[in-house]
Amino acid sequence: MSERPAPVFLERRSYRRRRLTDAARLLPVVGLLLFLVPLLLAPDKTDTARTAGTSIYVFAAWFGLIVCAFVLSRALSRGTDAAKDRDGAE
Amino acid sequence: MTKRVLLIEDEPNIIQAISFILSRDGWRVDTHADGRTAVAEVARRNPDVVILDVQLPNRSGFDILQDLRADPGTQALPVLMLTARGQKRDREMAERYGASRFMTKPFANAEVLDAVRALVAP
Amino acid sequence: MIGINVLVAVCLTYVAFLFAIAFVAEKRARQGAGGWLRSPLVYTLSLSIYCTAWTFYGAVGYAVRSGLEFVTIYLGPTLVMIGWIWVVRKLVRIGRSQRITSIADMISSRYGKSNLLGVIVTLLAVIGTTPYIALQLQSVSLSFSVFSNDTPAMLNVRDLNATALYVAVGLALFTVLFGTRNLDVNERHHGVVTAIAVEAVVKLIALLAVGIFVVWGVAGGPADIVARIEASEIAELQLAGGRWATLIFLSAAAFLCLPRMFQVMVVENADERHIAVAAWAFPLYLFLMSLFVIPIAVVGLGVLPGANPDLYVLTVPLELGQGKLAMLSFLGGFSSATSMVIVAAIALSTMVSNHIVMPIWLSARRGGASMSGDVRNAVILSRRLSIAAILALGYAYFRFSGGGTALAAIGLISFAGVAQVLPALIGGLFWRGATRNGAAAGLVLGFAVWAYTLFLPSFGGSLLLPASVLQDGPWGVEWLRPQALFGVETLDPVVHAVFWSMTLNTVAFFAVSLMGFPAPLERLQGAQFVNVFDHSKSAPGMTRGAAEAEDLLIMSQRILGPAEAQAMFQRAAQRQGKAGYLPDTTPEFVETLERELAGSVGAATAHAMVGQITGGASVSVEDLMAVADETAQMLEYSSQLKAKSEELGRTARQLRDANEKLTALSIQKDAFLSQISHELRTPMTSIRAFSEILMADGPMSEADQKKFSTIIHDEAIRLTRLLDDLLDLSVLENGQVTLNWQETSLAAVLERAVSASASGRGERPLRIRRAPGAEDVALVTDPDRLAQVFINLIANARKYCDAALPELRIAVARRDGAVVVDFIDNGSGIPAPSQGVIFEKFARLTDQSRAGGAGLGLAICREIMDKLGGAIVYLPGQGGAAFRVSLPKAVAKAAE
């Protein structure tokens, strides 16, 4: 009786999981782009290329990446555990 | 000329007994205890009579007998077979493979002596 | 001011503390209580050996020289860890499923277990790492000298050398102690990893403390720091675009390829889920490590202009009177240097030992692994010697290079060297077409270009590479100039070298791979690596052979140790539905065994050793077909079907065994009567013959008379004994026996058995070796019956052991709570086909003359052990005949 909704639920869960994995795969690419931005800002020695400003940018981007990685990693491992629990229960 | 017996048997006490009985009667007794090399030993010693035990290490006495009969040189060699198993089947096999005489252990000493004598004096 | 004595005392205390930590961790892990030792946190912290003294001290110096560029060294690894789902996860999964022991093993294993590649990667790693170890030694001795002189600029060269030597020796000792304790590298080094995690915390705290002091203690907070940066000589950002991108790539590549990183990231990984945590936690660690680098650099430039910026982390607090902070910072640097050296030495020694020393050792002893000698000891010894040699090499390099500026630049040079492994590694992970020859070509070419364009020029225009070559190219050929290959002159030397070496490496790798055709084993391994997530279990077997299980057992015992090898073989036999220690040598079993051994000696060596025994027929026709049929890989196969067929196979095997046994039994039943007849008639024949001789009055000497009556007497006794045995057996078999249960000790029963079966007159002497200490086990059993079993086994050894100097070893051990007593002689043992029948009645194997029994002894022993609740089995692969008597848990425990 309650078997009907379960597959839909699972489907949705595994769908979410796949998209999370996609995001995790994409994250380093985003990171690389962010880290290459200083090159665009400082093609040559111009007024805008200051160590202090660029440092703040790099560290901010870096920290942002870490936060994203943290969120994704938590979401992914929660998904794994939940899936495992389900499998165990059935 | 002394007649020679080759005793193929692995039980040391039985070897001693048969050797004693035969040599007291004037026979020269050679002994051999291994089944695998027995046929070669017969060819080497060229005895007048062979006394052959059935249950030997590495090879059965029946197999040895078969080999002896297959070789023209030893086809007619008198062979006295001894067995401690003493079943009817063993006697039949001995006859089929061409044993000259067949005796079960334990035997009477005189019986062995008579058999050996009879085998060399046709 | 802190004196040098205090410094040495603190240093020694810290080292003692690390030893204690490592020791406790090892102990806890052995007791199986080390749960927290293997947390994701420890895994993350262990990755921090990426941050060596070069980064701890050097980053600030780097920042002073090149501004923000230092950060690229941390950005590469950050990207790798954040993208763990791409590469790291796959590496770890493969590492675990193939029992990989090092980066060299990884490459070797991927490309058909080729030892050639193993050797190339090992050499590359040694050449790339040695200068790095030298750099660590230099940094420790330099930091010492900062404290020992009031003026940091004045360095006493002899002191520097002595310090470096002490450090090198101490590190070698630590590494040997905790790095070579377990042979199986996959069992991991709990002690080392825990100590390294502690060191990781120390260096982070140290750097943060100095940073906080500088920002809020010296400067007036973040805003002031920004102002100071603006005012300093590094305010202008000199971003060389090529360098920035190249260094991010280079550090990412090195992070994956450095032997020490591979060791902590893959080999020491205890749980795949830890990677997900390290994915954000390790970048955070790097973030914190680099957060204060620029502030320290700027403040250092203000406080100590002109001093060595590589030591600002140390000298700035010292200059400002913060002795304790400087001390902490010193310990941080010390931690960075030591942890790197320890892990690098472990990783390199594993590689050198598995890919260079062991293959030579094995081929030097022809006949190989199955011959005498202890492979296990040889492996451990070669690891230890390798560790010592590697540290000696590092020290020699430090002395040779004179600790000058050449060393400071070595960090990037070393990175570029090990990065040459990257194409073969990544190609091997994702491209099934990658071949052994391609990998070798890429590695060799890349390595050569790296050496020519970067490594050799780093020594300056000196003996290794003449200045003229550097200037005008070899033989004056301009376009071959090391730092301007093919006329590319505008690039920075590092970028130039990385560009050319990686490009040529990759091109060669792909070109040769595309042209060649991989060997079957390569293709199989390639499929297993690339599709590791599809079949995490394993692909179809790779070795079908007429391997003798017993030979394999003998070899495995030498490598894994007897207990572990026996347990493994027993498990495998059980899985196949067989009893005893000898499973069928199915491809699955051989593959499992090979992996198990690979954990100890590396994949290539394990493959070679198993190959020696399985007759070198390493790939069968079936496997070739399986590999050739690429589509087979795509076929979705039903696991249920597979389980069913396995089940069927198991049942069939059991049936076959049972049938063989039944047939053998019925033949024996048939032969039983004739056997009984034979056994009774044989002594009777002698008795009758000699009594007739004695009765007849022929001529007979007194000696003969005596001899003959003795024979009659002996044979009569033999007859009686036979009847006794028959009765005993029938009583035991029918369960009519009453056992006399008593409390006793194993030692007492053994003692009784040994003295009861002392050599009689005319009997062959048998030396009995025992281990009195181990025999001290309390038992509740029937001592008479147990002694009967022991007496029988000793008598058997006396009768059948065919060694020139017969010797019987009685070994006692506890296995899973049960007590096992092994009786092992030094004869030639019992051939495998006969091992199954020796416990049957009348199953006497050799010539009867020496035996003097009817072949009932072992049958009786088996019945007795059955009644006593234990067991007696034949133990194959011990050199001689070996019987294992096991007394069950309950019986052994009851008296404890």
Image (cartoon, coloured by chain):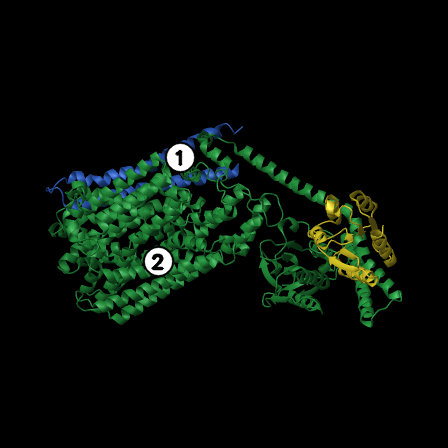
In the rendered image, which quarter contains the N terminus of chain C?
bottom left
Q: Residues within 10 Å of mark 1 (few under 14, many from 20)?
A: some
How far apart marks 2 and 1 lie (CA) works out to 40 Å
Q: Chain of mark 2?
A: C
Residue nearest the viewer, comparing A40 with C670:
C670
In the rendered image, which quarter contains the C terminus of chain C?
bottom right
Q: Residues within 10 Å of mark 2 (few under 14, many from 20)?
A: many
Q: Position of residue C206 (x, y in %)?
A: 27, 58
Q: Colour of chain B?
A: yellow
Image quarter for residue C407?
A: bottom left
Q: Is residue C303 visible?
A: yes
Q: Is residue A76 above or below residue C320?
A: above
Q: Colour of chain C?
A: green
Q: Is residue C395 above or below residue C548?
A: below
Of badges 2 and 1, nearer the viewer stands: 2
Residue nearest the viewer, comparing A58 with C776:
C776
SS for dot 1: helix
Callout 2, which amino acid? Ile
Q: Is residue C179 visible?
A: no
Residue holding disc 1: A17
Callout 1, which amino acid? Arg
Residue nearest the viewer, comparing A76 with C368:
C368
Q: Position of residue A41 (x, y in %)?
A: 16, 39
Image quarter for residue C216?
A: bottom left
Q: Is residue B108 above or below residue C772?
A: above
SS for dot 2: helix
Residue holding disc 2: C342
Q: Which mark is residue B73?
A: none
Q: Position of residue B96 (x, y in %)?
A: 80, 42
Image quarter for residue C198?
A: bottom left
Which chain is rendered blue in the image? A
Q: Are marks 2 and 1 on the same chain?
A: no
